[in-house]
Amino acid sequence: MDTAEKVDWATLNAHAAGRPARRLVAKAIAAAGGDRRPGVVLDIGAGAGADSLQFARRGWTVHAYDSDDTLAARLVENERMPGAVHFHHGDIAEIEQFPPAQIVYSTYTLGLLGPQALPEVWAKLVDALPRGGVMATDVFGTNDSWAARSDVATLPLEEIDAMFRGFQVIDRSVRDEDGRFLADKKHWHVITTLARKLG
Ligand SMILES: C[S@@+](CC[C@H](N)C(=O)[O-])C[C@H]1O[C@@H](n2cnc3c(N)ncnc32)[C@H](O)[C@@H]1O
């Protein structure tokens, strides 16, 4: 794989459609106070929607963003869920303002926005959260194979910590291991942070 543009996300997302929701979904909901008063979630780079749909099954209203439209075919599931997924098809870097939300959620996507767009998008995501709102997101670290690419943002820990200034960090996990991406071998360095906005 050479550039993010060349990845066939539709094929990847079709394969991922049946995967179980990530545990980060349950952690984010717990950090936001549980399911008693479900609110709004932004899922940034929702892919096939496994995590968006899980939030909606638990009663949350999800704004799911992706430039691949695999998720569109799954919106019929809204009929059977207490919450709902609203799909926004397009480039996340071009969103001017995100709707207010209690949870901002994003996995394996923010780094793909690239080093130029990521800080701008991040500032808008922080703005979407009220005081007490939950950020449940990951970014790629400097050990990641994609650190060699100029179109992917890979960040040192100090920069990730700086992004969370003004947040109380609740949980941090690090994946730093050899693995695969599609047919290729790849080292994954993925830093996931669960945090609550303070001010
Ligand atoms: C590695 S997948 C992650 C999907 C899902 N969050 C997960 O964890 O399984 C990355 C997703 O980000 C989307 N994506 C990458 N860059 C994007 C951009 N600039 N705007 C919108 N979506 C983007 C891709 O289409 C893809 O669905």
Image: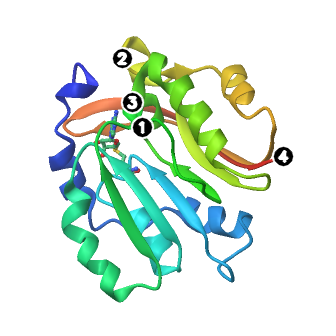
Lower position in the chain sequence, tag 3 or tag 1: 1
Residue shown at 68%/24% (left/top)?
157
For the residues marked 4 and 1, what is the alpha-carbon distance in whole angstroms? 25 Å
**Where does the image place residue 181, in percent across and percent down from the top left?**
29, 37
Check residue 95 in the rendering and tell me which mark sits there, or answer none: 1
Mark 2 touching mark 3, by CB under 8 A?
no
Instruction: Assign the N terminus to one quadrant of the image.
Output: top left
Residue 112, by quadrant, is: top left
Q: Which of marks 2 and 3 is nearer the N terminus?
A: 3
Question: Is 36 situated above or below 145?
Answer: below
Q: Can residue 174 be seen in this view?
A: no
Q: Residue visible at 37% across and 64% down?
A: 86
Q: Going from the N terminus, do you reach mark 4 or mark 2 first? A: 2
Look at label 4 and name its amino acid.
Leu
Mark 4 vs 3, N-terminal side? 3
Q: Is residue 134 above or below residue 198?
A: below
Q: In this view, does 188 lie to the left or right of 74?
A: right
- Which image quadrant: the C terminus? top right
Figure check: 189 above or below 97? above
| Left or right of 142, for residue 162 | right
Instruction: Give the residue type that dot 3 points to.
Output: Leu
Kindly report the distance in space between the C-alpha atoms of the residues bearing marks 4 and 3. 27 Å
For mark 2, what is the residue? 151
Q: Quadrant of ligand 1?
A: top left
Disc 3, SS = helix
Q: Where is residue 122 in the image (x, y as percent from the top left)?
A: 57, 33
- Which residue type carries mark 1? Ile
- Position of 30 compared to 54: left or right? right
Label 2 or label 1, whichever lies nearer to me, is: 1
Find numbered disc 1 in the image and state the secondary structure of the residue it sits on.
Answer: loop
Which residue bears the numbered disc 4?
198
Which mark identifies residue 112? 3
